[in-house]
Image: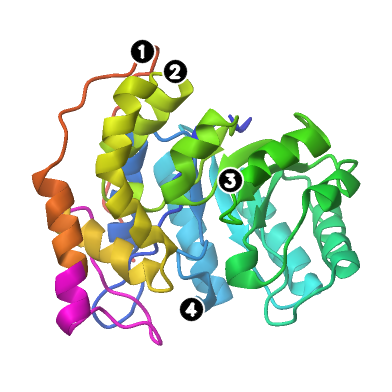
Amino acid sequence: MTVPWRDVFPAMTTQFRRDETLDLEGTSRHIERMIASGSSGLVMLGSLGENATLTPEEKRRVVSAAIEVAAGRVPVIATVVETSTAAAKQFARDMERLGADGLMLLPAMIYRADPRETLLHYRDVARATQLPIICYNNPLAYHVDITPAMFAELAGVTNLVAIKESSGDVRRITDLRNAVGDRYVLFAGVDDLALECAVLGADGWIAGIGLAFPGENQRLWDLAVARELDTALPLYRWFTPLAHLDTHVKFVQYIKLAIQVAGLGTEWVRAPRRVLVGEERRRILGIIHAGIENRPALSPAPGAPPARKARPRRSRAR
């Protein structure tokens, strides 16, 4: 399908059971809820999807489940994060054969590539597939910064179509527009900078904590795009303490706990991550419960598309 490169693409979690086995039914239920809320696409197997803890076969099963649930209603984007360029090329080909609609590509892991090596990694993986690719820039987490000047050098690679900008510096949106114009679609990648990025011209938002608050997440983006800032600002101020959970090293545990409290999934993670305990758990639960207790009433933003209806699904044994 043609990917509508705009609006909210949630970065989906991979749901597990208490014993750390894949819970594909739970993952599928959450995907259905996000589609029904109005999401324009699904990003699978990212950092929030605990990519590094999954085997190649498990990754294929997760993406296959997402493709089945989406059923052509929204595009499914598979994240490519490997330790070598060769492995990334192979996984990109695998996802294309599987039926993914696009990819999100990270720099190679463990080794900290220099700018020349990073550019070659992106060029080589892009040549291995016909799928459109989101380039994920997160120098805080992965210690490789793909600068606006580097994106200008990559502009001739036609299937590098979008950027998930997660540098934590909102000035990058303007710097990218000045460097490459509208060559790439720009996605906000940090939850507590989403409104700022939208005001500066981002086209979409790859969202995290919105997995627990999908209605509010979508409403905030619709208001931002409509430039209804008088209405967006109070909602954003309510949302921001929750959005800060997306910026901590334990963001997976924090967001999964929020999903569980919201009744949309479970908090189970794979080791070495562990579920929260003690004072940290109490503190994060306090933030989540405060958000729920002060949850604002929502009404559709001007010009916002209607939420998609849920599709009845047959249960599958896995």
Looking at the image, tell me whether mark 1 or mark 2 is earlier in sequence order. 2
Part of the protein shown in magenta: 263-283
Q: Secondary structure at mark 1?
A: loop
Q: Which mark is residue 53?
A: 4
Structural distance between the alpha carbons of marks 1 and 3: 26 Å
**What residue is drawn where x is 74% and y is 40%?**
176
* Marks 3,4: beta carbons within 8 A: no
Between marks 2 and 4, how big is the CA–CA gap? 39 Å
The answer to whether marks 1 and 2 mark residues whose Cβ atoms lie closer than 8 Å is yes
Q: Residues within 10 Å of mark 2 (few under 14, many from 20)?
A: some
Q: Is residue 85 left or right of residue 91?
A: right
Q: Residue 140: horizontal and vertical position, in percent?
A: 59, 67
Q: Position of residue 170 (x, y in %)?
A: 58, 45
Between 115 and 10, the one lying in front of the other is 115
- Measure how far apart labels 3 and 4 are at the Cα level: 30 Å
Tell me which numbered mark, 2 or 3, is placed earlier along the sequence. 3
Q: Which residue is label 1 attached to?
A: 302
What's the magenta bit mostly, secondary-structure-wise? Answer: loop
